[in-house]
Structure formats: C-alpha cells, structure tokens
C-alpha cells in the first residue's frame, strides 16, 4: 500500500490511506493532530528500574547486582517457590571465566533475579575420555588430545517425575587434526546429563554422555578451506531440548547447522538412548532449512519443543541465522513428535521449507537503541496458572555510542506468550514486569501507538510506525479502517488484523511506566508488535 503526500508551504504531512502494513524503515512523522491520551491505567505501578546497559556492573565482583545481566541461551524450570534459569557460559568481558560452568540464577516473580553462581565447577571427566576413545577408533587412528579446549553451551533444565534433569552441551573446539581449523573440522560436541533432587542445593549427579556428534562418512574431516560450508558430522550434538509426550514417551531434541534438527527417543529411567553406537542411532530429522538432501550446512539451530494440551500440537521453536545480530525465532507445529512439522502456510519444515511464523526479529521502539540477537529461546509454563513464557537473550546493537563492544551486552528477556485463535503462539513485545491485568474497554484502548510490522531483513533493525485508535472506532496509520474490541478475550481487530492486548510495561519510556501492549501475526506469519505511547 502507498501513502498520498500533501505538500504544504512549511513541510509535508503524510495522510495514511493504507489498510495493510507500512514500510517500517523509518518511524511515521508526527501528526499535528493526535488522539489525546488521558489514560491513567496502572499509573501507580512501579516496575523494574535496572538499566539495559549493564556494562558498569558487568564484572564478577558485581554479580550480586546482575539481575538478568549476562544471560545467554537461558532455560527455566520451577522448583519450590523459585524459577531457576540455567545458561551458556557467556558474559560481557568473559567475567565468568575461572568460576565454573553453566551460570544459574533464581526468581520468585520472573522479574527480580538473584545470581547464584555456577552449576558445575569442573569439566566432567567422561568428556575427554569419550573424545579420545573415539579418536583412537577412527580410520586412521588419531592420537589423543591431552588438553582439550572446551565450550560450555546451552543447557536445558526439565523436571521429570521427582527429578530435575539438566541436559548440557560440552563442545571440544580443537581442530580434528593440526592446529589450523581451516584444514579440518573442529572436534566433537557432546550432550551430557546430570540430575538433582532439589535445584536449591545445586547438588548434581552426573550421568555421563547422552549423544555426541558422530560422522556418517559422507564428508571427510579434512576441509577445503575456511569457507567450506559443509559438515563433517551428521547432526551437531548441541542445543538439547527435552519433552515427555502425553503417551509417556521421552524424547531429546537437538541440533545446530549440521544437517538440521534431530529427535531421538530416550529411556524414561535413564534419560539416554537405549543404544548409541553410530550415526545411525542419531534419531530422525524433524526440521531442516533448504535442500535437506544436499545441504549439510543449514542456518538453523537451538530447537525448543513443547506440547500444548489445549491445541493438541507439538510446537518446535527454532533459531534462524547467526547469533550476534540476525538471530530470529521461528515456530512450526505437528500432531506427532517426529513430524512432519508444518508452518502457518502449510509448508513442510521437516523437508526444509522456510519456517513461518516468525516470532522475534531485531527491532527497536523509539527512544531506545533496540535489541538484536533475540533467539535461542526457552519456553516454559507457570505450573499454577499455566501461563506460557518465552525467554532468550537480547543483545544491544553493534556500535552503540559510549559502550565498548556494545553487541556483547546480553540482557535476559522474559516475555509472555499468548495464543491466537487458530493456535499459534505470539510473543509479547515488552518484557514481563508483573503489571496487573485490568478490565479492558474501548475507552481504555483509544490512543496513540508505536507499531512494528516485522519484515524478515537480515541483520536489519525493524522500526515502528504510528497507529491511532480514535474514539469513534476509526484507525489511522499503519492499519486503517474500523476497529473493534473483544473485551472478554482482549483482542483488538482492525479490518482482518487481530491483535492480542494486555497490560504491559514501557521499558523504553523515560520514566518507565505501565502501558497497553499489542501482539499478533499477519496472515503470512509476520509478527506485529505495538505499545501505547502517551
């Protein structure tokens, strides 16, 4: 759709005549006639005040002040009165180095978090033993690596019966041969398992290896160069997620870039596959990107899987693209655990189709730097209210003035998930702050909004346009036409576009205040995020 332009002597006024989405490259100019907003809804609410730029308190010595600073690849489970969050070894300036592995913290309200330290203090001994045992069995046999270099990535915490299972990733980053990674692929990744009776104790019993990266013989471990975007291993054994089906089957979902996402059935008693001998025991591919028959290097990773008993679907959340800026979240669903997983357009993600809907993307509301790298999510429920939540890191964009290496600032985000009437999840645009949910009527919702209709644009920040809901039931700006509100379901409809409305928190405001927030999907699966501004 297009705008009509009316030239005036002292400038240009843009009259929105669109009934679809705007070009989101730039915010709408300010209209000289705006809807007066006198809404005092939740004005007495006091929310979080901690800064998004936490660089002044990023050091290990200041960890008591971190709250959700220094979070990457979070996974959350509730134990007793607390939610516990576990994550990849990652921090601004590597502040965590030398203090153990898998940082964790806890919260009673999902807003205020207490950093507790590290779940593990040392590398499990089985990792080096397993690595060198497999190297010795290669043809030709390779010598042992005496002092491997490790990465500690992406744990997944789940309550299983009366136990808490932590599936964790340990990656050996040494090249398979020599010292130049351009001459060979890097070594294996391993997924291990540890169990605890009570997360508050931080006492773990390590159960050893669950799966590891295993070659399938299609590609040799010698690379043609640093730009050889192929894959030596069949599935990359990182980024675990775990689910118990309604029928009581236990499944581990995992994978990253190498050949897609895999699902392997595990024994309910052990949490491991009943046999694990070769690449044939990897399980089955349930998601890919591109030609899954020929493309072994696929830009997707970080599977997270849930089952929604209300819709009776399995939902597979996926991270697309590189992690520092472009990361964006997609979701597909299936009636069976092993697929096929289909997108909102009916396309088969198991066979490599591009996955829609998209749920997150680099974005920025006005008066803020914006957020990038928003993916590798954890999805969890409040066990009492059954409310769903989405958690991931958000990074500040590259080159923010006054912040050294600003893109390495990783703030934990926790946002609510709601479900469209046709059974797709949407992530709310503002982080959860515990704002009271009040009754909603047409008078409360009339006003001015910033709205982002997110296009998929690699590494490009999506910016807002203006939406105005007039008290006469007319909408102007990014969506136009008549608007109606279902007060009971809290769903706003403008033409064919439906948006879920909730009381939320304007994190970009100065001062921060409660406000109304909007989230929905276009018919093609693009996220629509908005907030009332006043």
Image: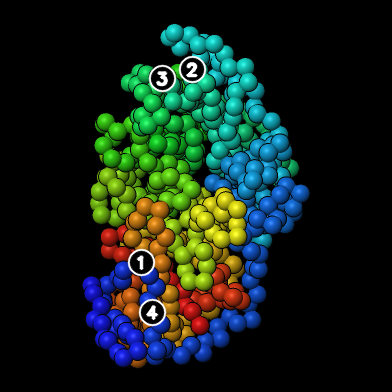
Residue 82 horizontal side relative to residue 387, left or right: right
Residue 186 horizontal side relative to residue 341, left or right: right
User: How far apart, in angstroms, are the residues tagged by discs 3 and 2?
Assistant: 8 Å
Question: Which quadrant would residue 412 be assigned to in this image?
Answer: bottom right
Q: Which mark is residue 29?
A: 4
Circle 2 is placed at which residue position?
177
Q: Residue 25 carries which label?
A: 1
Circle 3 is placed at which residue position?
221
What crowding class fits label 1: few (fewer than 14 Cα within 10 Å), some (14-19), or many (20 or more)? Answer: some
What crowding class fits label 2: few (fewer than 14 Cα within 10 Å), some (14-19), or many (20 or more)? Answer: some
User: How far apart, in angstroms, are the residues tagged by discs 2 and 1?
Assistant: 47 Å
Q: Is residue 218 above or below residue 56?
A: above
Residue 438 position, x and y percent, is 53, 79
Disc 1 element = loop
User: How far apart, in angstroms, are the residues tagged by discs 3 and 4?
Assistant: 56 Å
Residue 112 position, x and y percent, is 67, 61
* Labelled pair 3, 2 in contact (Cβ < 8 Å): yes
Q: Which residue is drawn at 37% across and 18% down?
A: 220
Residue 344 horizontal side relative to residue 419, left or right: left
Q: Which of marks 3 and 4 is in front?
A: 4
Residue 313 visible at all? no
User: How far apart, in angstroms, are the residues tagged by discs 3 and 1?
Assistant: 44 Å
* Labelled pair 1, 4 in contact (Cβ < 8 Å): no
Q: Which residue is drawn at 72% across and 38% down?
A: 99
Q: Residue at x 64, y 68 (%)?
A: 48
Name which of mark 4 and mark 2 comes first in the sequence: 4
Q: Is residue 57 above or below residue 276?
A: below
């Amino acid at each position: 759709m297009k705008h009509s332009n009316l030239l005036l002597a002292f400038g240009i006024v843009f009259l929105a005549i669109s009934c679809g989405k705007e070009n989101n490259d730039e915010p709408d100019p300010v209209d000289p006639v705006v809807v007066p907003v006198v809404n005092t809804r939740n004005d007495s609410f006091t929310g979080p005040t901690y800064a998004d730029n936490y660089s002044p308190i990023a050091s290990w010595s200041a960890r008591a002040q971190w709250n959700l600073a220094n979070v990457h690849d979070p996974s959350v489970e509730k134990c007793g009165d607390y939610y516990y969050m576990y994550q990849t070894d990652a921090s601004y300036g590597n502040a965590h180095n030398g203090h153990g592995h898998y940082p964790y913290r806890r919260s009673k309200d999902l807003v205020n978090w207490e950093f507790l330290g590290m779940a593990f203090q040392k590398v499990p001994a089985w990792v080096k033993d397993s690595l060198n045992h497999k190297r010795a069995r290669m043809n030709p046999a390779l010598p042992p690596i005496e002092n491997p270099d490790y990465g500690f990535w992406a744990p997944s915490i789940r309550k299983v019966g009366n136990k808490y299972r932590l599936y964790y990733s340990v990656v050996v980053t040494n090249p398979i041969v020599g010292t130049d990674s351009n001459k060979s692929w890097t070594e294996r990744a391993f997924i291990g398992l540890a169990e605890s009776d009570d997360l508050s104790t931080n006492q773990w019993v390590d159960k050893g290896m669950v799966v590891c990266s295993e070659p399938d013989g299609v590609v040799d471990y010698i690379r043609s160069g640093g730009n050889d975007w192929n894959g030596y291993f069949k599935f990359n054994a990182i980024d675990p997620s775990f689910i118990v089906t309604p029928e009581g089957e236990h499944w581990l979902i995992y994978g990253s870039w190498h050949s897609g996402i895999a699902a392997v059935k595990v024994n309910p008693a052990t949490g491991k596959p009943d046999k694990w001998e070769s690449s044939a025991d990897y399980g089955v591919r349930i998601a890919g990107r591109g030609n899954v028959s020929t493309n072994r290097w696929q830009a997707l990773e970080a599977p997270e899987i849930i089952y929604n008993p209300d819709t009776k679907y399995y939902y597979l959340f996926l991270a697309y693209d590189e992690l520092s800026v472009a990361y964006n979240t997609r979701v597909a669903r299936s009636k069976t655990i092993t697929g096929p997983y289909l997108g909102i357009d009916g396309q088969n993600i198991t066979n490599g189709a591009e996955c829609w809907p998209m749920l997150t993307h680099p974005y920025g509301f006005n008066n803020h730097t914006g957020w990038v790298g928003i993916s590798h999510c954890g999805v969890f429920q409040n066990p009492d209210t059954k409310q769903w939540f989405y958690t991931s890191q958000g990074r500040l964009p590259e080159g923010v003035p006054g912040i050294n290496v600003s893109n390495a600032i990783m703030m934990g985000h926790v946002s609510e998930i709601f479900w469209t009437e046709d059974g797709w999840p949407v992530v709310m645009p503002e982080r959860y702050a515990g704002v009271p949910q009040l009754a909603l009527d047409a008078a409360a919702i009339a006003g001015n909004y910033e709205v982002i209709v997110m296009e998929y644009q690699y590494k490009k920040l999506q910016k807002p346009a203006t939406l105005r809901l007039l008290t006469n039931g007319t909408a102007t700006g990014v969506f136009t036409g008549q608007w109606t509100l279902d007060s009971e379901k809290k769903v706003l409809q403008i033409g064919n576009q439906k948006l879920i409305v909730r009381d939320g928190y304007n994190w970009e405001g100065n001062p921060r205040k409660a406000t109304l927030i909007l989230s929905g999907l276009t018919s093609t699966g693009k996220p629509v995020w908005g907030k009332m501004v006043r």
